[in-house]
Amino acid sequence: MIVDRLKAAGFVFVAAILQVSVFSGVRVLHGIPDLLLVAIICVALLRGPVVGAVIGFWGGLLVDTANLGTLGVTSLLLTVAGYWIGRYGETTGRDRSHAPFVSVVVITFLYAVGSLAFHYVLGDPAPAREVLWSTLFQGIALNLILTWPVYALARIVLPQEGRRDRPERLHAIG
Amino acid sequence: MAAIGSTAQRSSSTHPTRGNAVFRRRLVVGLLCVLSLGLVTVYFRESDSGFLHSVQSTGASVLRPFEVAADRIASPFEDASSWFGGILHAKSDNKKLRKEVDRLREQAILNQSALRENAQLKQLLDYLESPRFPKDYRPVTTRVIARPPGQFVQQIVVSAGKNNGISKHDAVVTAEGLVGEVTKVANNVAQVTLLTDDSSAVSALDIATNASGISQSGISGQLTVDRVTKDQVVNRGDVLVTAGWRSGDLSSLYPRGIPICQVTQVGQSDTDLYKQIQCDPFVNFSTLDAAIVLVRKPIAP
């Protein structure tokens, strides 16, 4: 179990490093892909809300540290994102092939809104038009492109295990 | 049937387990959110040398090698991507750069034009302040705003007219020499007929030998000097200036001593009464940007 958690942490660590050093510089039609967000979504879908929340916190902390940003901002947003997606995977989205894609679309949108609101509250520059109009749709599209390979990789790194949080099977007694 | 009739139940031990799991995950996410908010609060409140800043600085230093490594690994892919992107954008870039080149070329032309105009204006200024400038005239410095429309008409338009005191037949000069005369005047512009026009004729004087004649337009932008009798001496290289004659109430249009041309060829034949003289005008009419109109000062009573 610990090895599994460490693998998840390593997976997100690599994603965070790649996001900071490579993907944040990639601009396609003004949109920026968010590998870290996609990776956290995938891990959360596979491992549930607790791991999703912890991994989100970890990834956010890495990004804020590497970027010398305000510590805790990205952590909070990604913690909530990881938790929600973990819950979704645990309940509705379980075993549905479209779950990663739906999760990525919804969370990318909510993450953008939440990030904008949080930065606004903190008094940072919060260009709503740019975040919610000029770049959001391109960002969602790019994240969707990343979803399939990242999810496939995540399934290899974190193979499905018999999850303890699943409802127990009903046994017929006869 | 027994299976259908029986009541399917979760094992009784699952209720506390599920309750614990729910509590645990809520506790974890709650703690993480509080921790995040705590980090934000402390980070904001502390100075740049505070604990979290120091930790962050150290963390960034630790992460730095990983970032560098990732960047190096990704750089060939980035280069390839840039290369493909460059190809995709080459057409629009080319168009953009061509526009830029055109704009800069226009700017360079404007600069060169301004430089040449500046040099000409300086020359004019020197001429106005020199003793060569005729004393009975007032200078009106003007810009050339229109050039000869074709080879058949040798006229220009200058940006000064009646409002500047210019009147018909005023002489037009530059620092190099005579340009022509004003042939039409409007309020703010005037037409100047150049020396090279067929209708122009100027009485000329050889300053070396005092020979006199009439300078008229010739071929290929040159001038011919007519009415120079064979007994007068004119040599190649001599400078001809305006004669500025006066006879009773009549006087020449041009003041005396304005350079007209330099003799390039002198000939005579037994059958002609006059010498055949050709000369090059001092003024380069094709690059004329500014000129001085000589307005005669009113004669004191």
Image (cartoon, coloured by chain):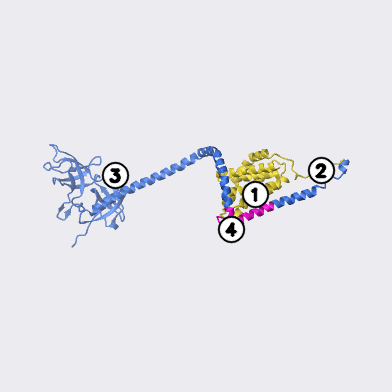
The chain ID associated with circle 3 is B
Q: Gap in Å between the C-alphas at discs 1 and 3?
A: 78 Å
Query: Picture coordinates of residue B182 (x, y %)?
Result: 26, 51
Which circle, 4 or 1, is nearer the viewer?
4
Query: Picture coordinates of residue B223 (x, y %)?
Result: 22, 43
Extreme residue in the bottom direction: B301
SS at circle 2: loop
Q: Earlier in the sequence, mark 2 or mark 1?
A: 1
Residue B35 covered by magenta stretch: yes
Q: Gap in Å between the C-alphas at discs 3 and 2?
A: 105 Å
For the residues labelled 3 and 2, say whether their Cβ atoms are less than 8 Å apart.
no
Which circle, 4 or 2, is nearer the viewer?
4
> Viewer-proximal residue, B239 or A96?
A96
Q: Would residue A153 be seen by someone viewing this image from the given angle?
A: yes
Q: Gap in Å between the C-alphas at discs 4 and 1?
A: 21 Å
Query: Picture coordinates of residue B52 (x, y %)?
Result: 59, 53
Residue B292 covered by magenta stretch: no
Specify the amino acid type for callout 4: Arg
Task: Look at the image and give the colour of chain A.
Answer: yellow
Checking the image for residue A170, the label placed there is 2
Residue beneath disc 3: B286
Which circle, 1 or 3, is nearer the viewer?
1
Q: Gap in Å between the C-alphas at discs 3 and 4?
A: 75 Å
For the residues labelled 2 and 1, say whether their Cβ atoms are less than 8 Å apart.
no
SS at circle 4: helix
The magenta-colored residue range is B29-53
Checking the image for residue B45, the label placed there is 4
Residue beneath disc 1: A57
Please give the letter of the chain rendered in blue. B
Specify the amino acid type for callout 1: Phe
Residue at image coords 25%, 52%: B126
